[in-house]
Image (cartoon, rainbow, N blue to C red):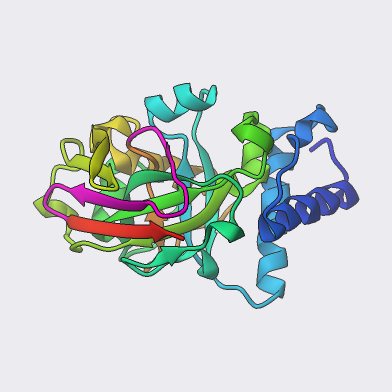
Amino acid sequence: MKLDISTINKLAEHLENCELQAHDTTKITDEHPEMDWDDAYAIQEAIKQRKIARGCRIVGLKAGLTSHAKMQQMGVSMPVFGFLADYFSVPEGGAVKLSELIHPKVEPEIAFVTKKALKGPGCHIGTVLAATDFVMPAIEIIDSRYRDFKFDLKSVIADNCSSSRFVVGGRARPVEDLDLRTLGVVMEKNGEIVSLGAGAAVLGHPAAAIAMLVNLLGERDEEIPAGTLILSGAITEAVMVKAGDSVNLRMQDLGSVNVRFI
């Protein structure tokens, strides 16, 4: 690590305030180019601890920038990982208040829920599938705190990977009934198709993203407990939304989920 604890806590406070007050900032590596990967995840962890101290619960985990489309869109070359707080969750068919966000975008994702704990190193796709209780369709609403969505990988990790809101719904299905690689996805905005894709867009198999997360946590001697919700990453490029928009995600064999923006 290159940053001291005081700087890490100061940056965590700054980024979380940007989230809670819905205002943007320049990427933090502009002021701290010496930051390394450990610093980035330490800032994210400090944000998580700030939320827990205020009474928030951590309800899940997420993988980000896991599709080649997203990596190309954001100009990065490897996935990132973050956490989901309780107030990020939006009821299926519910409304997201744009006044609470900066410049939100929506992404179609496959959500996993575990039935067994997962711990690395050595976790692979088969390990993840054996530990999965069921999967569901999910819409993640990302909202980078960085101006114009311009960031580098370390800055976005520190910012909890642009996490803001998510909604899950549709039908919960066990993975043994599905081929997650060929699972088709259609996302519509206001009744018009805005993105199409399949599960294989996420690192060849969505469970591969979760295995990478498990192994990363294993390096810190942490595990993913049974019953954890995990968003496996965007299948397509993110789509901008504005007030009045309605987004519907249809996923092969898993039904649909929708969310509104007001």
The x, y position of residue 178, in whole percent, is 12, 48
Q: Residue 249: say if magenta.
A: yes
Foreground of the two, 191 or 119: 191
Q: How many marks?
A: 0
The residues colored magenta run: 236-254
Outermost residue on the front side: it is: 244
Q: Quadrant of residue 170?
A: bottom left
The x, y position of residue 174, in whole percent, is 17, 59
| 246 relative to 52 in the view: left or right | left
The answer, for residue 245, to whether it is visible in the render is yes
The x, y position of residue 238, in whole percent, is 42, 37
Foreground of the two, 122 or 115: 115
Foreground of the two, 177 or 1: 177
Image height check: is 209 above or below 218?
A: above
Residue at x-position 32% and y-position 56%: 112
Residue at x-position 66% and y-position 71%: 52
Q: Quadrant of residue 118?
A: bottom left
- Quarter of the figure with the N terminus: top right
| 198 relative to 123 in the view: left or right | left
Q: Residue 185: say if magenta.
A: no
| 1 relative to 93 in the view: left or right | right
The x, y position of residue 195, in whole percent, is 28, 35
